Amino acid sequence: MLDYYLDYLKNWNNIKGTMSRHDYWSGLLTILLIISALLWFGAKIPFLNFLPLVFVGAMLVPYLTATTRRLHDVGRKTWFILLIVIPVAGWLCIFVETIQQTKDDEYFEQKSKAKEQKKIPLLNTRL
């Protein structure tokens, strides 16, 4: 499970590509367990009660990029992540999308084909 959490951290600035359902939810579960442990320590040791807030703030961007990659995996575009700003209904919609199985998406296939077509082939020159 720690590997999936480290994957969140390694790809904190990468919104391209996809993320499998297992990787996404394992990483998110690890984050929730760490937050729970920090909350427990904060309750037991009063001067540590700021740690959960600091950790959540630090994990916000990695969480959003991982969610974006997960949405790509189910066939949604990057802009779909903006639903997260809508309280309850948006969160529920993001949750429903992230628990779905991987879908084949023509959008991403067309995008990769367009990149291949933009490549300049080597010129065959005769000496």
Image (spheres, grey):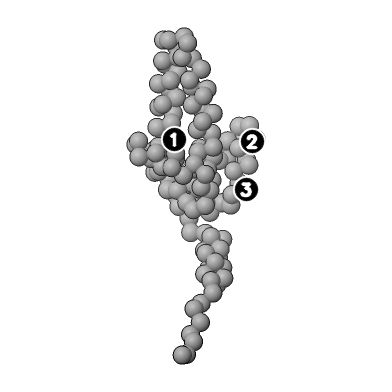
Q: Amino acid at mark 1?
A: Leu
Q: Position of residue 30 (x, y in %)?
A: 40, 32
Q: Residue at x 51, y 28 (%)?
A: 56
Residue at mark 1 to residue at mark 3: CA–CA distance: 21 Å
Task: Give the image location of residue 28, x and y in percent.
Answer: 44, 35
Badge 3 vs badge 2, beta-carbon distance below 8 Å: no
* CA distance for labels 3 and 2: 12 Å
Residue under circle 1?
28
Where's residue 54, x and y in %? 51, 24
- Which residue is the extreme one toward the right? 86
Q: From the viewer's perspective, tell me whether residue 25 is left or right of residue 114.
A: left
Q: Secondary structure at mark 1?
A: helix
The mark that comes first in sequence, 3 or 2, is: 3
| Disc 3 secondary structure class | helix
Q: Which mark is residue 85?
A: 2
Residue shown at the point (50%, 37%) measured from the top left: 63
Q: Residues within 10 Å of mark 3 (few under 14, many from 20)?
A: few
Indicate whether 16 appears above or below 65: below
Say what secondary structure mark 2 lies in: helix
- Mark earlier in primary sequence (2, 1): 1
From the viewer's perspective, tell me whether residue 77 is left or right of residue 35: right
- Give whichever of 120, 30 is nearer the camera: 120
